[in-house]
Amino acid sequence: MTREYDVAVLGGGLMGAAIGYGMARLGRRTTILDEGDLAFRASRGNFSLVWVQSKGMGMPAYSAWTRRSAAAWPEFAAALKQESAVDCALDQPGGFTLLLSEAEMERRAAFLARLHAQPGFETYPYEMWDRARVRQVFPGIGPDVVGASYCPLDGHLNALRAFRASHLAFAIRGGDYFPDHPVETMEALPGGGFRIATSKGAFTAAKVVLAAGTGNARLGPMLGLAAPVRPQRGQALVTEKASPFLTHPVVTLRQTDEGGIMMGDSQEEAGFDTSLGLGVLAVMARRAARMFPEIGRLNVVRTWSALRVMTKDGFPIYQQSEAAPGAFLCNCHSGVTLAAAHALLLAPMIDAGALDEALLGAFTTRRFDVPAAA
Ligand SMILES: Cc1cc2nc3c(=O)[nH]c(=O)nc-3n(C[C@H](O)[C@H](O)[C@H](O)COP(=O)(O)OP(=O)(O)OC[C@H]3O[C@@H](n4cnc5c(N)ncnc54)[C@H](O)[C@@H]3O)c2cc1C
């Protein structure tokens, strides 16, 4: 039996779930085809920041897209709560990058000045704070903290709940989720639409959205879409629950809505190896304890690693196939931040059959076609 849909989304990570939910909201009969529980999923191991500051060096359009998504998160979180009854604990009080030496302060200030001075960059508020000012917000900082950069647009949430809520809301809107259905092959049909073969049966759909993370590298070329993506390992650790003392997220550590202190910002090229290294974890924990000595007194209760989906230049890919109209490919490494845009802005573009050139034109893989010597 071949099941028929308006839209097939390949990949049931947060990106696939957000796009799938967006399509189902628009009344499209939508399916999400996914691998099984043992799949690599960034969506189950991330750091949960909705982060704006620092994004877009070399591509101002990325900063603009990120800001749009951060601004759309309250609407997205409210819709998810209303539909699924799951609260994502979205909190956007502004975020900090804490700096542990005068040299770090200077480098950070220079970086942010360069970022905002780029031609075409839509600037937004940010400030460099000295130690005294940082202490007013974080009385518990350690003696090594020299200052911080602060951006009022940053925030965080409970990404596992956002992931669950997106899947629930998708299902409530009539979407069909098929786990354990890894996509094996795809072809464009002569009269339009696509045939998708999974390990457990075939599907047809008028449109197909490739949101399969690192799996897109294999799937994309079947429909004339390149996906030069690779896994990049990130490790994280979380402590036992503590009374609230971090009122704002810091880029490398945050207090979760449940009370634990989460730390983690490693970026490691290790292929599909998800093993943990005590060396990396110790470095992250030591730096966190220099920022907040209180953290050094807490027990670590869990450590994990997960694989980011990384493009060649670190910026997202949003691409529509010229060879197979109706096929779209999406990849990014900050899909928590961008989930609101994926559900509320990208899904309508896919529904209309064309990505908005002004918003997403910079993100096609055409940018990789520049000869290396240029
Ligand atoms: C350590 C770490 C920290 C992070 N921190 C943040 C953060 O603070 N803020 C932020 O915005 N983002 C963060 N991210 C990124 C964020 O988690 C992801 O961008 C987001 O979850 C979206 O992931 P995804 O759906 O694109 O990919 P994944 O979650 O990897 O999902 C890909 C899906 O595709 C499926 N798939 C693969 N091949 C096939 C196939 N052939 N057929 C069907 N399905 C297939 C897989 O089974 C999987 O379900 C972090 C990631 C990591 C690893």
Image: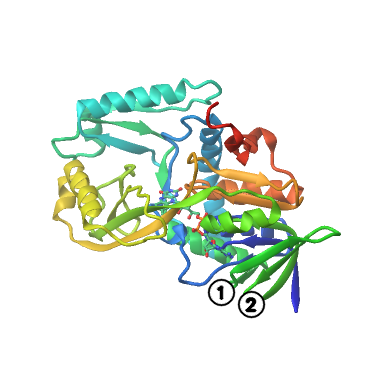
Q: Which mark is residue 180?
A: 1
Q: Are marks 2 and 1 in contact (CB under 8 Å)?
A: yes
- Relative horizontal placement of residue 18, taking residue 204 as reference (left or right): left
Q: Up-down: is 150 above or below 323?
A: above
Residue 264: horizontal and vertical position, in percent?
31, 50
Name which residue lies at 36% across and 61% down. 274
Name which residue lies at 24% across and 48% down. 284
To which residue does mark 2 refer? Answer: 200
Residue 98: horizontal and vertical position, in percent?
27, 36
- What secondary structure is marked by label 2? loop
Name which residue lies at 67% across and 51% down. 328
Q: CA distance from mark 2 to mark 1?
A: 8 Å
Which is more toward the observer, 173 or 330? 330
Name which residue lies at 34% across and 44% down. 249
Q: Is the residue marked by circle 2 packed among few (<14), some (14-19), or many (20+) residues within 10 Å?
A: few
Q: Amino acid at mark 1?
A: Asp
Q: Amino acid at mark 2?
A: Lys
Q: Earlier in the sequence, mark 2 or mark 1?
A: 1
- Relative horizontal placement of residue 297, taking residue 361 as reference (left or right): left
* Snapshot quadrant of residue 194: bottom right
Q: Which mark is residue 158?
A: none
- Relative horizontal placement of residue 354, taking residue 363 as reference (left or right): right
Q: Up-down: is 144 above or below 274?
A: above
* Snapshot quadrant of residue 103: top left
> Which quarter of the image is occupied by the C terminus?
top right
- Count all numbered tags in the image, as a single digit: 2
